[in-house]
Structures are given as structure tokens and as C-alpha cells.
Image (cartoon, rainbow, N blue to C red):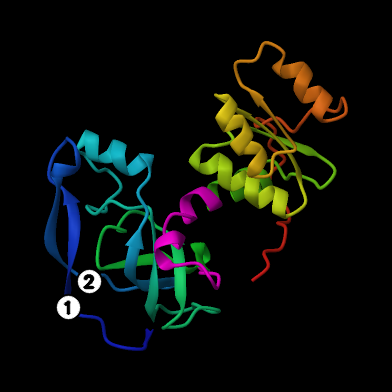
Amino acid sequence: MADAATPPHDMTAIVISGPGGPEVLQPTRMIVPRPGPGQVLIRVAAAGINRHDCLQRAAGVHHDGNPVPGLEAAGEVVACGPGVTGIAPGDRVMALLQGGGYAGFAVADAAVTLPVPEGLSLREAAALPEALFTAWWNFFGLMELRPDEFALIHGGTSGVGHIALQALSALGYRVVATAGSPQKIEAARGFGARAAVGYGDPELASKVLAATGGRGSVPFSTCRRARTWPPISR
């Protein structure tokens, strides 16, 4: 295990003491985890908070083996486990986690750990992994969206939806979105939607057809299974 500085023996972590609101999140001392093969240890600067975390806290029960919530975090790599390449101690990264983000240190698989772009703070980066990986996997892993196709995103101003709109439009894909109010429709256009329609609009189907020149869009249920993935510029 390569490391730039030996991490401490223990750390402060947040656990769910029972079902309820934010008051059930309680600090405790835990041993700092160590990265295994293909993993990195991150000194957490910020952790994302998403709907899964809130539902988990409200339920008060955790089933995936990690007593610490938190599916995404950003910080500095402290150590790398065997077999990790392209990531080194000292790198600023953001990562998708199997829980554990609400702590001083967290272990992440290197495959779902990304460098934090210049100009982006660690606090901002911590809010990106869950939405980014979800959008990328759905559109390119499951649906294999092609450059000549239109994508339709229902809920274009949701957490995943607005990230998907920005990412896909930045990559040159043509995207249509739905939203629930005039303000959100306008916001969806600002995020990159070629056209945006209220999802309760009785003429939704005809307006989507008009926006796509009569071609329609790739339905979410389409699953071509991934054979190749679009390159990610680093």
C-alpha cells in the first residue's frame, strides 16, 4: 500500500442512532479503514447528501454492511491499495462510495474515483459523483446513446436530470426534457435542453415529436447493453 503520510489510527464518523431526522446522526470514533486491492483511501473534505441518505436516516436501519452513511465524497487521496494505477497519494478526487462518506476518511474503488477538475472546490465536487455516474451509466452503459439520437429526460431539473442535461449537451448530444413548472422548464433550457415541456402537458408526445423532427427519442427502457463506452476527457 503506497501512502504519502500514515493515516491516524481512528477518526470521527457519523452513524445513524435510530430512525428520525437529522438529530439521529451522531458522531462516534471508529478505526480508519485501509484500502484493499483496487481501492484508495480518501481524507474526506466534504460529503454529498442525497435522497438515499435521507431515506436511510429516516428508516434507521442499514443493510449494506457499512454503519456510516454517505454515497459520495471528495478529498485528498492518502493511500492506494495494490493494483491501483492512474491515482496517487495527494491527488484531489471525488468518488462514489458504498457508504462511509460521513467520516474523516473513506475507502473507494479506484474505478469510480475521478479527479476533481481545476476551478472546482472539493465541496462542490462532493455533490457530483452520484448524479454523474447515474447519468453516465444509464445513457451510455444501458441505452448506448448514439450521436444521431435524441434523449428524453423526465425531470430535467432534478439532481440527476440537470447534471445529465449539462453533461450530454456539452458532449454534443441533443436532449429534450420535461419539468413541472414554467420556471423549471426555463431552467431545463438553461441546462442545455433543446426543448423543454411540462410533463403534465396533454400535448407532451406531439411536442416531443416536433422537437425531434418527428423522430422521437430514445426511451429509458431501451437497453442495448454496453460494448464500448464514449471516452472521458481528463
Write down the residue under mark 1: 9
Residue that lies at the very extreme toward the top in this rendered image: 202
Q: Nearer the viewer, residue 22 or 29?
A: 22
Where is residue 231? Give x, y as percent. 71, 63
Given residues 86 and 45, the one toward you in this image is 45
Does residue 231 appear anywhere in the picture? Answer: yes
> Which quarter of the picture shows residue 107?
bottom left
Q: Position of residue 233 (x, y in %)?
A: 68, 68
User: Looking at this view, is 84 or 230 the one in front?
Assistant: 230
Quarter of the image for the C terminus: give it.
Answer: bottom right
Direction from residue 225 to residue 94 in the image, left or right: left
N-terminal of the two: label 2 or label 1? Answer: 1
Tell me whether the residue at label 2 lies in contact with that at label 1, contact meaning CB atoms closer than 8 angstroms: yes
**Residue sitting at x 40%, y 73%:** 40
Amino acid carrying label 2: it is: Val
Amino acid type assigned to the residue bearing label 1 in the image? His
Residue 1, horizontal then vertical, whole percent = 37, 84
Please provide the residue range marked out in magenta: 115-132
Q: Residue at x 17, y 35 (%)?
A: 20
